């Protein structure tokens, strides 16, 4: 299986050219950025997190039109065999998106609760975050995934069990 096949499939589900991007243009260039980051094995080898996140969430921590589609792409990344660096970048971006304060005042978002939509999308794949914490592949990604779970997981006992089970796979400040 192509490690990016799920990511590519999820990207194709969205009409990126109909969305306004954080850079002020249409978001039709975002899929290429997402794929480049998803395939990146090490920092400095390509676009990096900073090159993607400004297209998804504004510098003022506002949800933008691509925020929800990018969340669904991130969940596809977590379900794929992508390199550790890209997983770090994507889990960091997911945490950043989920902690945005408000949504941009654009017509396409009027009447929507993008924060709730993003949370619902992540909740559908919550087990991928658990798997990320326990994978042992990256302390950074485990940390971001655990912090996301502290925001969304309603079962606090399960979260406490995860923390104990993960042990040293979590950074020292997140261990029990």
Image (cartoon, rainbow, N blue to C red):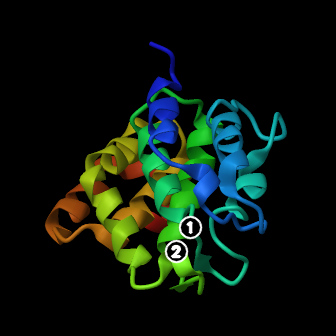
Query: Which is nearer the eye, 150 or 123?
Result: 123
Residue 54, percent from left and from top: 73, 65
Q: Count the numbered circles shown.
A: 2
Residue found 50% across the figure and 37% down from its top:
12
Residue 43 lies, with reference to residue 116, above or below; the image says: above
Q: Earlier in the sequence, mark 2 or mark 1?
A: 1
Residue 107, percent from left and from top: 55, 81
Residue 174, quarter of the rendered image:
bottom left
Whether residue 143 appears in this view of the structure is no
Could you tell whether 79 is left or right of 33 in the image? left
Residue 135, percent from left and from top: 40, 36
Query: Which residue, given by chain and number where applicable, does mark 2 sit on?
Result: 108
Residue found 63% across the figure and 70% down from its top:
57
Could you tell whether 98 is left or right of 21 in the image? left
Disc 2 residue crowd, few under 14, some 14–19, many 20+, Cα 10 Å: few
Query: Which residue, given by chain and number where applicable, does mark 1 sit on?
Result: 65
């Amino acid at each position: 299986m192509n490690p990016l096949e799920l990511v590519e499939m999820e990207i194709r589900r969205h009409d990126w050219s109909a969305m306004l991007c954080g850079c002020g243009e249409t978001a039709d260039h975002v899929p290429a950025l997402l794929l480049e980051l998803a395939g990146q094995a090490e920092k400095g080898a390509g676009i990096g997190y900073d090159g993607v996140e400004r297209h998804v969430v504004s510098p003022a921590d506002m949800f933008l039109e691509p925020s929800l589609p990018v969340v669904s792409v991130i969940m596809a990344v977590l379900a794929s065999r992508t390199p550790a660096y890209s997983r770090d970048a994507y889990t960091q971006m997911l945490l950043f998106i989920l902690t945005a304060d408000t949504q941009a005042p654009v017509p396409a978002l009027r009447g929507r609760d993008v924060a709730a939509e993003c949370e619902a999308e992540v909740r559908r794949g919550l087990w991928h975050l658990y798997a990320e914490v326990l994978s042992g592949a990256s302390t950074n990604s485990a940390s971001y995934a655990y912090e996301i779970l502290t925001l969304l997981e309603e079962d606090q006992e399960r979260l406490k069990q995860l923390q104990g089970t993960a042990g040293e796979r979590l950074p020292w400040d997140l261990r029990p």
